[in-house]
Image (spheres, coloured by chain):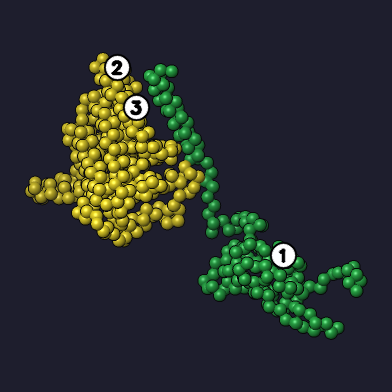
Chain colours: A green, B yellow
Amino acid sequence: MSSVSKYFSGLFTGIKSLLFGMSVTWKELWTKKVTRQYPENRDTLVISDRWRSELTMPHDENNEHACTACGICEMNCPNGTIKVISQMIETEDGKKKKILDKYQWDLGMCTFCNLCVLTCPSDAIKFENTFENAVFNREKLKQQLNHEGSKLRDKKKEPLAPKAE
Amino acid sequence: MILNYSQPLEVTNLTSWLDAALRSSLPEFWVLLIEFVLVGVAFLAAYAVIALILIYAERKITAFFQARFGPNRVGKWGLLQSVADMVKILLKEIVKINRSDRFLFFAAPFFMIVASMATFGAIAFGKGLHAIDFNIGVLYVTAVSSLGIIGVLLAGWSSNNKYSMIGAMRSGAQFVSYELSAGFALMTIVVLAGTMQFSTMIEGQRYCWNLFNGHISSLIAFIIYLISGHAETNRGPFDLPEAESELTAGYHTEYSGLQFGFYYLAEYLNMFIIASIATAVFLGGYMPIQVKGWVAFNGIMEYIPSYIWFFGKTAVLIFLSLWVRWSFPRLRIDQLLNLEWKYLLPINLVNIVLMVILVLSGLTLTDLLPGWF
């Protein structure tokens, strides 16, 4: 190809590709806007279930939870975010038993690594996707997860009971 | 008299009434003085207001090109966003740079703004809304608008900052190169129109815009003018002087507050000035769309005020410039200079000869189809 024809073919292919580029952006101008406007769309907002933003301890209708106060979550927490405060009580048949007194979690220290939930032997805690956690005071980030007056749910392990004895 | 009734919305009515009122009670000198001051104030106000509108429009259109909403929190649809930004920039501190050339550093933004303002004065906004109308209008515009580059070079030099210096030098190389093409493109149309005065040029485009009158040659000149005008304003794919990954912010890195605001304002106004010069030269300026023989149609078109025609045409060109800006990737400095010196300039030189041939051998549309145009 001679340099002259190269010059002109380069010029016209250049113009063609520029016009093609402009047609692409022109179509883009009329596409639906993808921005989601957050405070206005709270009603229709969908947050993934896997999103971890708040640690909770599910309680059933009898105000019972599944936490045995074993403290494995506290040991596994890399930041020392969780404090399991337990107390020893004596049951009716004279056995000593450790029960949960306070389950404290500090949102401000948590990295949402999910290790506490993964290691919990009794599935007592889980992460929720409620993400609006802003507060005015750092003290308000420290939460107590077990409800007032709640107690441990009785485990239904009748088939296992004879084997243990 | 009929024209007065048919064009009730023209600003000419107001200005001629004001002039008559002043002349009836004051001597010539005071009339002129008051009118000069009024025109100056009006221009300064229009300068700021147009810049604010342009900044808002650019942010909004840019957002739409990127499938976003753009500013929409301050005021309805974000209309007050650029006003809020202006207030912020006015309140900011003007930082004094150690070991900079203090005098030149402070003088540089004024060169920029004065050059842009002087060009702004030569724009015909509408019938009777034309402050500077020399018989060498086109020459005046090209001469005065190229003064702005002094402000850029001074800013880069006086900042005592290597990034500013490189940015200013790039800007200088770019501006000087593309000024040549813009000038040649305008000269092509001067050959066609036979005049350099903007008002005569616009009147001559009553039935046939220069863009169509010179068909092939005019179209090439129009495209070249838009490209080189776009490059002169340091925007879009030609924004090398402000390549932030290499040069932070280019020549205005060290400026803050109002001084930075001057550069910002001048950049947007230069975009408007390029668009409005192109409107006046190629698209018939403030002339409404008129077709020979269609009296009723022409009457309706005349009814729309001339400044609306002007701003409408200019807005289309500004939109085109934004469209280009958000379509193409940035050029490298050698590609930039290649485009000018290897493509635009030779094409332009051939084009001007072609236009001379067209005009001399009577091949323009007005010569070929006198009944239509």
User: Which quadrant holds residue B259?
Assistant: bottom left
In the visual, does B75 lie left or right of A49?
left
Real-space Cα distance between discs 3 and 1? 69 Å
Instruction: Return the chain for callout 1.
Output: A
Circle on res. A119:
1
Q: What element carries label 2?
A: loop
Q: Reply above or below: B180 against B108.
A: above
Q: CB of mark 2 within 8 Å of CB of mark 3? A: no
> Percent position (x, y) of residue B164?
30, 48
Real-space Cα distance between discs 1 and 2? 88 Å
Name the residue rendered at 47%, 42% in the picture: B65
Instruction: Return the chain for callout 2.
Output: B
For badge 2, the amino acid type reads Leu
Circle on res. B363:
2
Name the residue rendered at 55%, 67% in the picture: A134
Residue that mark 3 sits on = B343
Residue lying farthest top?
Answer: B361
In the visual, does B340 lie left or right of A130?
left
Depth order, front residue of B189/B209: B189
Q: CB of mark 1 within 8 Å of CB of mark 2? A: no
Name the residue rendered at 10%, 50% in the picture: B30
User: Which quadrant holds residue B242?
Assistant: top left
**Crowding at label 3, few (<14), some or many (≥20) Cα neighbours within 10 Å?**
some
For badge 3, the amino acid type reads Tyr
